[in-house]
Amino acid sequence: MDTLTVDWAEVGNLSRNNTLEMEQLTDAAYYILLSLLVPRHGYGIMSYIEKLTNGEVAIGPATAYTLIKKLLDNGSIVLTGDDSQERRKTYAITDKGKQLVSNEIERRKRMAEHGDQARISAKEEHDNG
């Protein structure tokens, strides 16, 4: 099984292209928002993503915390609870973040449909050509 490790290149693309503002999420931002449908701390986010994807996606601390800051800044997630008493910060998704996830799920479904259509079309062209 191949493992996708998210690195700084993806985080850099997020900054350069402002994909959060265009409501088109990178894979890492998408998985972080999915993980925060239930409030979690940073390590919990990373662990949940690995579990959800059966180890196919691993997001390291640098990527996770950089994206968490961007998601906080854009209002997609919030810090929850009284963190003055806790060492771990807990994050939760906002309504804006939920809408981003919903839109992204639909966008990715359409992309998968396009891929299926392209494969069928290519096979038909090959068989008829």
Image: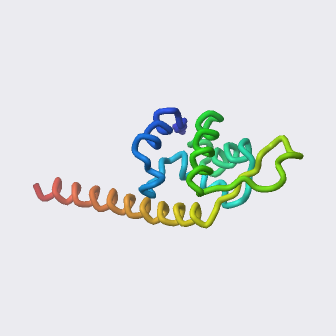
Q: Is 66 left or right of 121, judged from the image as shown? A: right
| Between 64 and 76, the one nearer to me in the picture | 76
Q: In x, y percent, where is residue 67?
A: 58, 43
The quadrant holding residue 58 is top right
Q: In x, y percent, where is residue 68?
A: 62, 45
Q: Residue furthest left?
A: 129
Q: Residue furthest right?
A: 85
| Between 42 and 87, the one nearer to me in the picture | 87
Q: In x, y percent, where is residue 122?
A: 22, 55
**Quadrant of the image containing the N terminus:** top right
The mark tally for this picture is 0
**Quadrant of the image containing the C terminus:** bottom left
| Between 29 and 16, the one nearer to me in the picture | 16
The quadrant holding residue 117 is bottom left
Colour basis: rainbow
Seen at 89% across and 46% down, the residue is 85
Q: Is 108 left or right of 78, judged from the image as shown? A: left
| Between 82 and 66, the one nearer to me in the picture | 82
Seen at 70% across and 57% down, the residue is 92
Seen at 51% across and 32% down, the residue is 8
Q: In x, y percent, where is residue 41?
A: 75, 47
Seen at 48% across and 65% down, the residue is 103
